[in-house]
Image (cartoon, grey):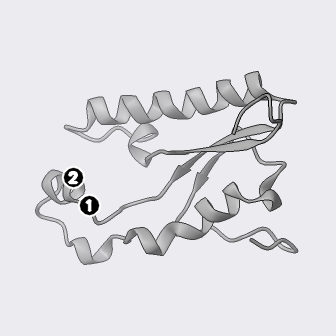
Amino acid sequence: MSRSSGSGVIVNVSSDAGVVGYPTWGAYGVSKAALDHLTRTWAAELEGTGVRIVSVDPGNMDTAMHRAAEPEEDPSQWARPADVVEPFVWLASDAAAATSGQRVEAQGFAVPAGETR
């Protein structure tokens, strides 16, 4: 991927912590908010180069960090990485060529009608 080759996709992993303020998640949330803003900025800067950039919020994930942050919660209610892979794959594909600068929520994502991965 490079501007000189005229193609490529950058897929950033975001979080709802970048949109919603959670107690004790301050630095993490700020970093994800900044990542979403960087995604929009780079999309504008890369417009017309063939390089796209998107941000994907995978939703509540069953990770060690999440378990440590919310030990009282039931992690069986949280998604596993395999549960939310579809938007990542689609956004990296040529079918999503018109998508850049957006923030996508992986949970509940559906490939747009008439398009395939």
- Which quadrant is home to the N terminus? top right
59 up-or-down from 55: above or below:
below
- Please indicate whether residue 7 sits to the left or right of residue 103 in the image: right
Q: Residues within 10 Å of mark 1 (few under 14, many from 20)?
A: some
- Report the residue that reaches farthest toward the front: 5
Q: Quadrant of residue 93?
A: bottom right
Q: Quadrant of residue 54?
A: top right
Q: Which of the two residues, 22 or 50, is positioned nearer the viewer here?
A: 50
Helix, strand or loop at label 1? It is loop
Q: Residues within 10 Å of mark 2 (few under 14, many from 20)?
A: few
The residue identified by callout 1 is 63
- Please indicate whether residue 1 sits to the left or right of residue 37 in the image: right
The residue shown at (29%, 41%) is: 22
Residue 105 coordinates in the image, percent (x, y): 56, 56
Find out whether the residues at labels 1 and 2 contact each other: C-beta distance under 8 Å.
yes
Q: Which of the two residues, 56 or 52, is positioned nearer the viewer here?
A: 52
Number of the label disc, if any, that sits on residue 65: 2
The residue shown at (29%, 66%) is: 62
- Please indicate whether residue 95 sits to the left or right of residue 80 in the image: right
Q: Quadrant of residue 31?
A: top left
The residue shown at (57%, 28%) is: 37
8 up-or-down from 86: above or below:
above
Residue 101 coordinates in the image, percent (x, y): 70, 37
Q: Amino acid at mark 1?
A: Thr
The residue shown at (59%, 60%) is: 88
The alpha-carbon separation of the residues under discs 1 and 2 comes to 5 Å
